[in-house]
Amino acid sequence: MTTASEAYATVRAVIEAAAPLDPNSGAKIPLRWRGEDNPPLPDLPAPFAFTLFGASRSSTIENGGGRGANRHRNFGVAEIFVFIPKDWGERYGTDFAEAFASALRPYRDNGVTCEDATVYPGGDGAQISVPGLTEPGNYFWSACEANFYFDLIG
C-alpha cells in the first residue's frame, strides 16, 4: 500500500520528468513547489511551473477483518500552474500544461492511479498569487489539474 508521502513523491516524479523545454534556452522549464525554498525568478520573465498538491477525505472501499484492517481509498489532486511571459500567447501555456497532462493521463504505477488530467487556459498572472512572483503582471498562466488516488490499509 502507498502512503500519502509516497503518492505525492510518485506524482512529483512524473511531473519532473514531463517538464517541457523552454524554446529560448532548450532546458526544461523550472519547477516550483509549495512549501519549498524555491529559487528566485529571473529578472526577465521566463516560463516556469508551480505545483500544489491537495487531498480529500478517504473512504473505505473494502472491509478486511475489522478495525485497522480495512482498505481506504485516498483521493488527491495535483494543480500545475504554468506561467509564461505575457507576450508569448496563450498557446504556449496550454501546450506546456498539456505536456504534464499527457504524462499523467492515464498513469498507474507505484500504487498511484491517475485517470484524468485536464488542461485549461487561465489568464493574467495578476489574477493569482505565487510565492516569489513579484511581477505577476508580466506573466500569463494556464493550468493542468490531475486527479489521482492511492489505497491504504488501516
Image (cartoon, rainbow, N blue to C red):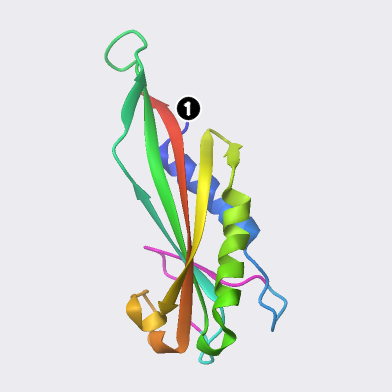
Relative to 59, does residue 108 appear above or below in the rendering?
A: below
- The front one of 68 and 70 is 70
- The image quadrant that residue 122 belongs to is bottom left
Q: Give whichever of 14, 122 is nearer the camera.
A: 122
Tell me if residue 16 comes above or below residue 130 in the rendering: above
Measuring from the top left, give residue 60's x and y in whole percent: 32, 23
Which residue appears at 31% of the width and 29% of the height?
Answer: 59
Above or below, comparing residue 67 to residue 102 in the picture: above
Of 68 and 144, the residue lying toward us:
144
The percent position of residue 78, horizontal first and vertical second, equals 44, 53
Percent position (x, y) of residue 116? 51, 46
The quarter of the rendered structure image containing the C terminus is top left
Look at the magenta stretch and give its main secondary structure. loop
Residue 38 among those drawn in magenta: yes
Q: Check disc 1 and report its element: helix, strand or loop.
A: loop
Horizontal side of residue 24 vs 66, given as left or right: right
Looking at the image, the residue that sits furthest to the right is 26
Q: Amino acid at mark 1?
A: Met
Question: Which residue range is magenta in the image?
Answer: 28-41
Asked if residue 40 shows in the view, the reply is no
Q: Residue at x 62, y 61 (%)?
A: 99
- For the question of whether residue 27 can be seen, the reply is yes
Q: Disc 1 marks which residue?
A: 1
Q: Residue at x 51, y 91 (%)?
A: 43
